[in-house]
Amino acid sequence: MTTAVEFIHRGMKQLHEALDKTLAELTPEQLHTVPAGHAKANTIAWIVWHLARTEDNVVRFVLQNRRPTVWQEGGYAEKLGLPPVAQGTGMPTAEAQALRLTDVALFCGYTQKVWASTDEFLANTPAEQLEATVTVKPFGALPAVQALGQICLTHAMAHAGEIDLSRTLLGLATVRGV
């Protein structure tokens, strides 16, 4: 029988593959296009940035006792000219739409380090450690495994669907080909 941690780990790997494929296939213009020009739609660039930053914060900072994030360790905010702490939660739509990944290759290097950090954490953390209660703003107190499943996987998969819709509106195939 598959454990919750194994399920989350497998799902995270699938998510990372889909995000990697999107970053590799799309031009900077496509990444930053507002889908259908809609005033409230997120760009693919913003979504991927939001997902990577959120995962980095939850896995490193929250679940590993305030361990510095990959974002902090690598000085990515300065290198990419992006917010040093924000991860997009609650960001006004106009600000989100204005976010630019000016160096997609450097950003991809960041995401690869986040994915590797998450993979290492999930592969090496005993299941009982993930039963501990953690606090994740704005969700409050919840078991660590729920933070992983609800925020890093389920929330992210919902955004992956948003990416696929955006790809469709750009005239591109979806990542999963459905």
Image (spheres, grey):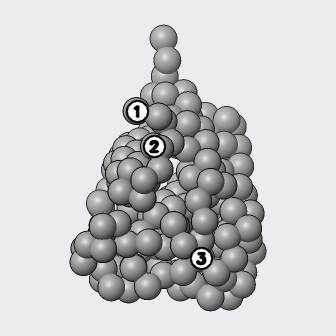
**Residue 101, which numbered label?**
3
**Residue 105, which numbered label?**
none
**Residue 174, which numbered label?**
2
Q: Earlier in the sequence, mark 3 or mark 2?
A: 3
Quarter of the view holding residue 93: bottom left
Q: Is residue 10 visible from the viewing direction of this image?
A: yes
Residue visible at 60% across and 65% down in the picture = 27
The percent position of residue 1, horizontal first and vertical second, equals 48, 11
Between 71 and 38, the residue placed more toward the observer is 38
The kind of residue tagged 2 is Thr
Distance from disc 2 to disc 1, alpha carbons, whole Å, reads 7 Å
Residue visible at 61% across and 34% down in the picture = 126
Q: Secondary structure at mark 2?
A: loop
Quarter of the view holding residue 82: bottom right
- Residue that numbered label 1 is attached to: 178
The percent position of residue 76, horizontal first and vertical second, equals 68, 78
Q: Residue furthest top?
A: 1
Front tag of 3 and 2? 2
Asked if residue 150 is positioned above or below residue 169 in the image, the reply reads: above
Contact (Cβ within 8 Å) of mark 2 with mark 1: yes
Q: Residues within 10 Å of mark 2 (few under 14, many from 20)?
A: some
Between 176 and 13, the residue placed more toward the observer is 176
Residue visible at 67% across and 70% down in the picture = 104
